[in-house]
Amino acid sequence: MPAKKPTMRDIARAVGTSAVTVSKAMAGKTGMSSELRTKILKKAAEMGYEYPHSSHALPREHLEIGILIPDRYFEADSFYAEIYKRLVKKLADQGHFGLLELLDPENERDLVLPSLMTTKHVDGLILLGEPAKAYYRKAAQAGTPVVFLDFYDEQANADAVAGDNSYGAYRLTSHLIRLGHRKIGFVGNTKATSSIMDRFLGYYRAMLLNDLPVREEWIIPDREMTGGLVKPALPEELPTAFVCNCDMTARMVIDQLTEKGYRVPEDISVTGFDDYPAGNENEIPLSTFRIDTDGMIELAVKTLLERCAGEKKPFGRLVVGGQPVYRNSETELRKK
């Protein structure tokens, strides 16, 4: 006999909560902690839960949109968990349904497309967070309208919505240069994602335009190629400032500098990127670049709905801007 398909009640029993709470978690509704929501969504993915598909009974203006996120990016209070919640709300505000599936490393490696696509459960798919290139290119060729969110690939058959990463890092680096810094490092694995590469290029452009050297030992990886964060290996000779590809990395760098006896920003300045997550009251307020994430979400939803409606225009990348936010993690270079 075929295995019984899990229900919301099964998930609720496995997690130790109610079916109503499970339903609210999947619909992106408020009223629960981020930890519980993440636990429910992960358990549903582990149990192979299939979202009820009722599009045949629904008017076509009510679409079911899949949201696929690599599992390694989806943790409680993570940047992508927050973006997912806002995506579901934006879709619901327009009368549509957002259905989550987490992409586990084995399926990513073996190029197994999400069940939301293979079982025809969704009208379109938003791929949030950059998986392996072979995987997202295969997903883009599967016949379901797809939008890449927060990354892009000009050779894939899909629209993409991304933040203005290059400009943001350029602004932060130029700001440090105006403060007198000439020895500036970059922290981020430039080959891990298109976003990190673009942020590096923004940093590199500012350095070149100001005739400043970009030293190889000051370009420091912060993660594995699979996306997992690793402790940056700081060089023996330190620059006077670091431009970090994200706020989490910036805080890791600040912690390491503090352990080594350096003060931020008095001895070494540090900037982040994304303006997420907010630091706690004991942490140094971080200077960063805030991308308009709500604008990215709105544009991704609009673009995908147009594709679902039959739009045939060429695929392209849509870029959303942002603004630098200067707090207390960088300062003017002291004359020695």
Image: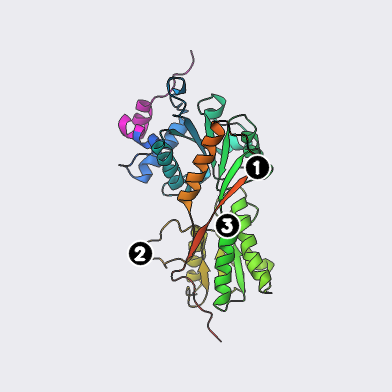
Which residue bears the numbered disc 2? 281
198 sits left or right of 1 in the view: right
Disc with the residue nearer the chain's start (3 vs 1): 1
Q: Position of residue 30 (x, y in %)?
A: 33, 42
Of helix, strand and loop, which one carries label 3?
helix
Which residue bears the numbered disc 1? 133
Of helix, strand and loop, which one carries label 2?
loop
Q: Is residue 286 above or below residue 308?
A: below
Image quadrant containing the C terminus:
bottom right
Q: Position of residue 36 (x, y in %)?
A: 36, 41
Q: Residue at x 32, y 29 (%)?
A: 19
Which residue bears the numbered disc 3? 165
Q: Are marks 1 and 2 in contact (CB under 8 Å)?
A: no
Question: Mark 2 is on which residue type?
Answer: Glu
Question: Mark 1 is on which residue type?
Answer: Lys
Question: Mark 3 is on which residue type?
Answer: Asn
Q: Which residues are magenta?
A: 1-23
